[in-house]
């Protein structure tokens, strides 16, 4: 294999979810692209990496100091949805069901990976809540062991704000799942988050 191809495959395979085989397919595809298109792509990636910022309020990605969601005066400013990563904001926004604000932690607590609460944007969240405008905090954290650890830590920190309602997104059985294949923790969450049928 060409050294140049090996270098490109090596760099592309550093991306999450991209193995060497996929990286090779991407490299071959890039080779077939028009040189102008490749130039546009690399300039766009370079500019993104150099110029993107994190919102000073919610830690979401932004081109400005404050992201468009935080700047939108039409959004419900009394509700904030706490998520792990920027991708989670996009997932929730794609539902068109949530009209409040967000707070991006930047990960979850993971002692195995050396990620402590101080490495996340939890203090920034508490500062926002202390300002008094937020009335409800929705915790939309993954159900992994690290996610549950982060959830419990956040709940203990948020108890210092008695006027703030703390909720968690419902966890349970997915649409189309068969009960016999669902793990016990998921069934437990589904039972605890049950609702009345109208």
Image: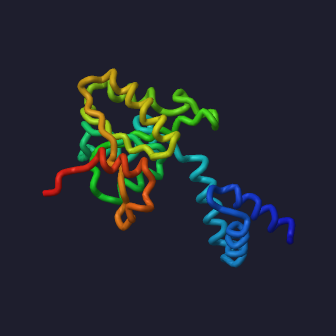
Please identify the residue farthest to the top as the structure is shown: 160
Tell me which residue sits at (63%, 54%) in the image: 46
User: On screen, 171 above or below 158?
Assistant: below
How far across and how far down the image is residue 124, in percent?
43, 29
Please identify the residue farthest to the left as the structure is shown: 198
Please identify the residue farthest to the front as the structure is shown: 180
Tell me which residue sits at (43%, 50%) in the image: 184
How far across and how far down the image is residue 2, in percent?
86, 70
How far across and how far down the image is residue 53, in percent?
51, 43
Which is nearer the eye, 189 or 38?
Answer: 189
Which is nearer the eye, 11 or 16?
Answer: 16
How far across and how far down the image is residue 143, in percent?
45, 46
Quarter of the image that includes the C terminus: bottom left
Quarter of the image that includes the N terminus: bottom right
Q: How many labels does the image show?
A: 0
User: On screen, 164 above or below 197?
Assistant: above
Tell me which residue sits at (69%, 73%) in the image: 25
Q: Which colour scheme is used?
A: rainbow
Which is nearer the eye, 177 or 35?
Answer: 177
Which is nearer the eye, 13 or 59?
Answer: 13
State the image quarter where residue 81 is shown.
top left
Q: Can residue 63 be seen in this view?
A: no
Q: Can residue 15 be seen in this view?
A: yes
User: On screen, 73 above or below 15?
Assistant: above
């Amino acid at each position: 294999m060409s050294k140049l191809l090996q270098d490109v495959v090596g760099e592309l395979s550093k991306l999450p979810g991209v193995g060497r085989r996929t990286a090779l397919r991407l490299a071959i595809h890039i080779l077939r692209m028009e040189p102008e298109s490749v130039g546009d792509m690399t300039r766009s990636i370079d500019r993104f990496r150099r110029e993107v910022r994190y919102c000073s309020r919610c830690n979401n990605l932004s081109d400005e100091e404050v992201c468009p969601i935080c700047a939108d005066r039409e959004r419900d400013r009394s509700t904030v949805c706490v998520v792990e990563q920027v991708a989670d904001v996009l997932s929730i926004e794609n539902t068109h069901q949530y009209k409040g604000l967000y707070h991006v932690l930047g990960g979850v607590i993971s002692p195995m990976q050396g990620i402590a609460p101080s490495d996340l944007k939890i203090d920034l969240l508490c500062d926002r809540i202390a300002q008094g405008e937020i009335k409800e905090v929705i915790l939309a954290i993954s159900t992994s062991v690290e996610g549950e650890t982060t959830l419990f830590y956040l709940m203990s920190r948020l108890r210092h704000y008695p006027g703030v309602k703390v909720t968690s997104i419902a966890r349970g059985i997915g649409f189309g799942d068969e009960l016999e294949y669902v793990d016990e923790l998921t069934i437990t969450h589904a039972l605890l988050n049950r609702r009345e049928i109208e």
